[in-house]
Image (cartoon, rainbow, N blue to C red):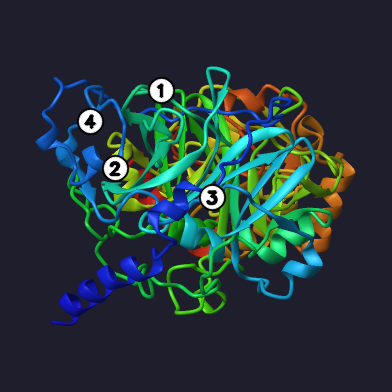
């Protein structure tokens, strides 16, 4: 009964929140002019959606009211019209066609620090679109940095997406059709009245059928973060020409655990995640990946490769859900996430979260949620943005059915919890270790790794660096497990700092002394160890049986518990070796 009442109330809220001037009044409003300007500096991308072109359908097969409200060429379409639901009439949710902007101080009077905003920056022109306004209008036809854009938000899917609205040299103005497909907003352009899917930016009916809008990099972040990033930025004004209860959430409780999506008629949602789980979606070169917010919250940093492109997804707390409480400012903290390329200066960086900071393992520089280095040798540098879009899981899975779901335990690069690599097999490459300490354990000041294995014990081989902040955090954990397992397993630390630009041998010795590390450790004169032992970043740890088989490689920091689990597995694998 409670669910039935909620759905009934929800339908009423949709009608109430969409109340707008009469359709005749709407027709009298002037759309934004069609300015032209310089192309955006951000790298655009396209999101593909499988398409098909069924035979033209009769008018009676069209979504309810479509024929009387639109002059669309409905003979052209790429999706079955049966997938489209009519909820409201055309433009009943009014797009903003003549947006006004205000400065940060004025917006501060009605925006709380944790409220979500959709951030866009083109050519130094930064714009914040408060979700409290987009909630009621869903589309803003705007010009940013000289580029005509459409900032869009579908509350039912939690998708905030910005499109470039110039197609074949013509600037389009977008409105709401009042229709949904897979519970997602269907837009239309006023020039041809073609229908467009908001989740993909692709036209699904009319003259532009199968045309793809360019998606521009944007982020859904907190108002406080926007102010810190863009102190000279501008904000969409509440002076929209419409009277709405801006700041209120007409979809109260929509993202509660277990809540089902409204009017969803689409592919069955994979059960790997709950339907309304928040994910950040990334699609590159035909590969799609969903990054669940609850997993991102645990690791804070996700290194990955998508479509052959090394990327990092960063997450931080402090952004409220717009769909939780009756007032958006009081919504649950769900955090914010964004994706960036890991390639910088012909080098691929690996990131981790340590001591409350995001750092790269190659230089130890500190980074923020915007992909900016704020301290260290790379200070002032920025990572290139990768187009990423917030979705609910049901929405992302419906439009990207072949998606992979990010799992830190299965990642192929380093992340903040340490990443398991594949079993390495026999380690045939030998190398020399010049010891800083532990000569009594290994039998000399300089030993070959093959002689270490000849002692007949399993080995924890840890490659670290003296100026690596992640290593500084992990070495004490290694020391604890050494004290617990040192009678069963040999622990060896190899300082590779001189090879990766993270300190000299003197820096390595100093770190061991500072942290009170007592297990055997030293350096090697052979930089080939980085390739032979797949050292993708520091620290990298191999768990090696006495026969020389690496049963596990992990890049990135490990907790004491994770170390113990891997050591127990190593001991078991070494029995009879």
Answer with mark 1 or mark 3, whichever residue precedes in sequence: 1
Q: Is residue 463 above or below residue 80?
A: below
Alpha carbon separation for disc pair 3 and 4: 43 Å
User: What residue is shown at x 74% (from left), y 31% (from top)?
Assistant: 524
From this viewpoint, which residue is outermost toward the right? Answer: 506
* Residue bearing mark 1: 211
Q: Is residue 211 above or below residue 495?
A: above
The mark closer to the camera, 1 or 3, is 1
Q: SS for tag 3?
A: loop
Alpha carbon separation for disc pair 3 and 2: 56 Å
Q: SS for tag 2?
A: helix
* Residue bearing mark 4: 79
- The foreground one among 346 and 572 is 346
Whether tag 3 and tag 2 are in contact, CB under 8 A, the answer is no
Please state, as top left, top right, bottom left or bottom right, where the C terminus lies in the image: top left
Answer with mark 3 or mark 2, whichever residue precedes in sequence: 2
Q: In this view, does 97 lie above or below 164?
A: below
* Residue bearing mark 2: 69
Q: In which quarter of the image is residue 523?
A: top right
The mark closer to the camera, 1 or 2, is 2
The mark closer to the camera, 4 or 2, is 2
Alpha carbon separation for disc pair 1 and 2: 22 Å
* Residue bearing mark 3: 418
């Amino acid at each position: 009964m409670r669910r039935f009442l909620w759905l009934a109330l929800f339908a009423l809220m949709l009608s109430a929140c969409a109340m707008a001037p009469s359709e005749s009044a709407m027709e009298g409003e002037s759309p934004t002019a069609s300015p032209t300007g310089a192309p955006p500096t951000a790298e655009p991308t396209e999101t593909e959606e499988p398409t098909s072109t069924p035979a033209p359908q009769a008018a009676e097969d069209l979504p309810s009211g479509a024929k009387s409200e639109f002059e669309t060429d409905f003979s052209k379409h790429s999706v079955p019209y049966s997938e489209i639901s009519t909820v409201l009439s055309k433009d009943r949710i009014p797009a903003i066609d003549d947006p006004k902007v205000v400065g940060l101080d004025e917006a501060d009077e009605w925006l709380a620090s944790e409220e979500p905003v959709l951030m866009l920056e083109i050519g130094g022109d930064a714009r914040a679109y408060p979700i409290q306004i987009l909630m009621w209008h869903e589309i803003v036809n705007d010009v940013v940095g000289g580029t005509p854009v459409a900032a869009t938000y579908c509350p039912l899917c939690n998708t905030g997406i910005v499109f470039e609205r110039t197609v074949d040299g013509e600037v389009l103005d977008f409105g709401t059709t009042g229709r949904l497909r897979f519970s997602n907003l269907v837009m239309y352009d006023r020039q041809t009245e073609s229908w467009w899917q908001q989740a993909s930016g692709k036209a699904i009916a009319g003259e532009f059928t199968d045309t793809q809008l360019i998606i521009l990099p944007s982020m859904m972040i907190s108002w406080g973060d926007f102010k810190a990033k863009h102190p000279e930025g501008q904000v969409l004004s509440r002076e929209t020409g419409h009277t709405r209860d801006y700041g209120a959430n007409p979809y109260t409780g929509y993202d509660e655990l277990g809540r089902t999506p409204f009017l969803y008629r689409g592919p069955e949602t994979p059960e790997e995640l709950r339907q309304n789980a928040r994910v950040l979606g990334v699609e590159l070169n035909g590969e799609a990946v969903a990054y669940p917010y609850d997993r991102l919250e645990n690791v804070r940093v996700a290194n990955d490769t998508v479509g052959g492109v090394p990327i990092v997804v960063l997450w931080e707390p402090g952004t409220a859900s717009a769909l939780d409480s009756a007032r958006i400012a009081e919504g649950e903290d769900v955090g914010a996430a964004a994706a960036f390329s890991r390639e910088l200066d012909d080098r691929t960086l690996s990131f981790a979260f340590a001591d409350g900071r995001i750092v790269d393992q190659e230089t130890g520089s500190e980074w923020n949620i915007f992909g900016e280095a704020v301290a260290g040798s790379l200070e002032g540098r920025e990572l290139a943005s990768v187009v990423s879009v917030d979705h609910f899981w049901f929405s992302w899975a419906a439009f990207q059915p072949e998606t992979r779901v990010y799992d830190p335990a299965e990642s192929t690069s380093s992340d903040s919890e340490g990443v398991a690599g594949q079993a390495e097999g026999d380690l045939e490459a030998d190398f020399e270790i010049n010891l800083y300490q532990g000569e009594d354990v290994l039998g000399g000041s300089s030993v070959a790794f093959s002689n270490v294995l000849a002692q007949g014990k399993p080995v924890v081989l840890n490659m670290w660096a003296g100026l690596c902040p992640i290593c500084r955090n992990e070495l004490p954990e290694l020391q604890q497990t050494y004290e617990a397992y040192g009678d069963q397993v040999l622990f060896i630390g190899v300082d590779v700092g001189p090879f990766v630009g993270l300190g000299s041998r003197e820096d390595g010795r100093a770190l061991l002394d500072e942290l009170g590390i007592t297990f055997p450790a030293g350096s090697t004169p052979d930089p080939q160890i980085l390739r032979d032992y797949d050292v993708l970043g520091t620290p990298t740890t191999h768990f090696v049986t006495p026969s020389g088989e690496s049963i596990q490689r992990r890049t990135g920091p490990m907790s004491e518990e994770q170390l113990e689990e891997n050591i127990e597995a190593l001991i078991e694998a070494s029995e009879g070796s």
